[in-house]
């Protein structure tokens, strides 16, 4: 039986298409989740067991009790289930495979308590493309572990995007009663906890980026207030967030909070303007034919946002730049959706490639 485990949102979205492929092939499996990812799996009609391991021993006990033959795991920025399972799998002689969901923080996803690479490495790491492999090796991951499969999540999104052209999704509930106001979708992230809130601070994922989700959302509200046109802002919370008060807004702005359980793709499809920071959702928006805005004031490495690096998101590095960009977008009226974008890493067979990799490695183990 295959074990899938993803405790962070990005990882869960990568393994979901692989789980669906396993289901089509009649491969038995079970899924471990966290409080963050249980609703994400449920949204794809995938039953998952919410489980927290606090040691390798607990993970090992679970693998023994469930008769697991191989593991397919997401990755995380802190040490938790996925890393404990990698060590336990090695002890039991089981194959473990990790599937990456982003183009940064490669080393961080596999470091041990001393910041070293080795203890928590799986046997194989599936990456999106040649660039991802190159960056991973530069950060110290062994090249022999890496396989290029494409992104299962983006491959699945590409399929859905083409279907949307003929059969668009339903208009999201949060867009109700928007009248003729421009709808701005703001894609929130949990950056304060991950990177700190001020210069010199660090979070779980690294040093201060130059901004936080709070400073960015207030800059967005202030810029829209200065423009003065009645607008509706839909803030899509990160899956790790549950509630949040709106920032200070002018009377011309209505600010609505969209709960994490509301589907992202219809929001990306129908919003007039999409604003984010360095979330992968900007790349997803571009794949749907949109031209999102990446607002990263005083950012040290804005190109870590893949959509910015690929030139499919408009980068605004200051509040003035954001204001000017919003003025032009709002003045231009409703944005025409471009054609569905094609990226090599959004290959439709990415999930199948991961499973084929697992099957081949398991056969090799038996020889």
Image (cartoon, rainbow, N blue to C red):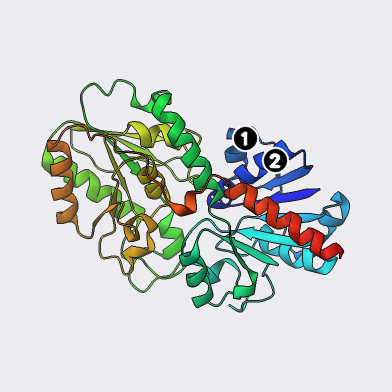
Q: Quadrant of residue 74?
A: bottom right
Q: CA distance from mark 2 to mark 1?
A: 8 Å
Could you tell me which residue is drawn at 77 percent across and 38 percent down? 26
Residue annotated with mark 1: 42
Q: Quadrant of residue 338?
A: top left
Q: Is residue 171 above or below residue 123?
A: above
Is residue 76 something that shows in the picture?
yes
Could you tell me which residue is drawn at 46 percent across and 66 percent down? 131
Q: Is residue 11 above or below residue 86?
A: above
Which residue is more in the foreground, 333 or 32?
A: 333
Is disc 1 placed on a helix, strand or loop? helix
Q: Is 198 on the left-hand or right-hand side of 47? A: left
Is residue 112 something that shows in the picture?
no
> Disc 2, disc 1: CB below 8 Å?
yes
Q: Is residue 93 above or below residue 212?
A: below
Which residue is more in the foreground, 338 or 316?
A: 338
Residue 133 locus on image (x, y percent): 52, 68
Could you tell me which residue is drawn at 58 percent across and 56 percent down? 149
Q: Is 145 on the left-hand or right-hand side of 287? A: right
Q: 10 Å neighbourhood of mark 1: few (<14), some, or many (≥20)?
A: few
Residue annotated with mark 2: 48
Q: Give the quarter of the figure containing the C terminus.
A: bottom right
Residue 91 locus on image (x, y percent): 82, 69
């Amino acid at each position: 039986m295959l074990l899938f485990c993803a405790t962070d949102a990005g990882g869960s979205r990568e393994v979901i298409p692989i789980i669906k492929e396993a289901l089509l092939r009649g491969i038995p499996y079970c899924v471990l989740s966290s409080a963050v990812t249980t609703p994400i799996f449920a949204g794809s009609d995938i039953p998952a067991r919410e489980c927290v391991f606090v040691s390798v021993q607990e993970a090992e006990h679970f693998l023994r009790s469930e008769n697991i033959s191989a593991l397919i795991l997401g990755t995380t920025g802190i040490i938790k289930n996925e890393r404990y399972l990698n060590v336990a799998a090695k002890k039991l002689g089981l194959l473990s495979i990790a599937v990456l969901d982003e183009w940064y923080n490669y080393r961080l996803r596999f470091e041990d308590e001393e910041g070293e690479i080795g203890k928590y490495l799986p046997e194989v790491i599936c990456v999106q493309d040649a660039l991802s492999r190159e960056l991973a090796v530069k950060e110290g991951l062994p090249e022999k572990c890496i396989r290029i499969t494409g992104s299962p999540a983006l491959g699945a999104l590409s399929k859905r995007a083409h279907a949307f052209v003929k059969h668009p999704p339903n208009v999201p509930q949060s867009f109700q009663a928007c009248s003729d106001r421009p709808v701005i979708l703001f894609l929130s992230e949990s950056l304060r906890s991950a990177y700190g809130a001020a210069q010199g601070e660090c979070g779980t994922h690294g040093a201060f980026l130059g901004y936080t989700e709070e400073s960015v959302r207030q800059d967005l509200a202030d810029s829209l207030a200065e423009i003065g046109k009645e607008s509706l802002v839909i803030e899509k919370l990160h899956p790790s967030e549950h509630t949040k008060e709106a920032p200070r807004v002018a009377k011309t702005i209505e600010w609505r909070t969209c709960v994490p359980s509301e589907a992202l793709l219809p929001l990306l499809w129908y919003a007039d303007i999409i604003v984010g920071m360095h979330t992968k959702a900007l790349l997803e928006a571009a794949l749907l034919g949109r031209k999102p805005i990446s607002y990263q004031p005083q950012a040290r490495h804005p190109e870590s946002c893949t959509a910015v690096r690929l030139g499919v998101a408009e980068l605004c590095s200051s509040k003035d730049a954001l204001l000017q960009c919003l003025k032009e977008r709002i003045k231009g009226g409703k944005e025409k959706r471009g054609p569905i974008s094609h990226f090599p890493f959004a290959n439709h067979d990415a999930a199948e490639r991961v499973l084929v990799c697992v099957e081949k490695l398991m056969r090799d183990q038996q020889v």
